[in-house]
Image (cartoon, grey):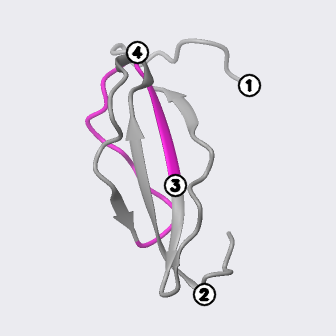
Amino acid sequence: CDESYGPIEGFEYVHWSPEKESEPEDLQYIPNNRITVEKLSPSEHFSFKVRSKSRGGHSPWSDPIRVTTRRADGIQSGKIL
């Protein structure tokens, strides 16, 4: 991670559903680089982006990544690499 703004103290992320053309959910802060996002709908696409936070400010936002949640029956759909 880029530490040009000082030592990283945590991360901020947003997520949204591009299919629903929804606005990003409220900005969330996490103190480390791992998160489990709960209460997402099954078989739905979501986009996420993240940035680091330090005393000197924030890094630029990452490029969005797109993920798909598992189907309601727990079977992963699509091609798995």
The disc, 1 or 2, on the residue closer to the chain's N-terminal end is 2
The three-letter amino acid code for the residue at tag 1 is Leu
> Along the polypeptide, which appears first: circle 1 or circle 4?
4
Residue 56's disc number: none
- Name the N-terminal-most of marks 2 and 4: 2
Identify the mark at residue 71; answer none if there is no mark.
Answer: 4
Q: Which residue is mark 1?
A: 81
Secondary structure at badge 2 equals: loop
Q: For mark 2, what is the residue?
A: 6
- Residue 38 lies within the magenta run: yes
Q: Residues within 10 Å of mark 1 (few under 14, many from 20)?
A: few
Residue 31 falls left or right of residue 33 = left
| Badge 3 density bin: few <14, some 14–19, many ≥20, Cα 10 Å | many
Q: Residues within 10 Å of mark 4 (few under 14, many from 20)?
A: few
Foreground mark, 3 or 1, reads 3
Which of 57/74 is in front?
57
Image quadrant containing the N terminus: bottom right
The residues colored magenta run 31-49
| Residue wearing tag 3 | 50
The amino acid sitting under disc 2 is: Gly
Residue 7 in picture, x, y percent from top left: 59, 86
Estimate the x, y position of residue 22 in percent, counting from the top left.
33, 28
Q: Residues within 10 Å of mark 2 (few under 14, many from 20)?
A: some
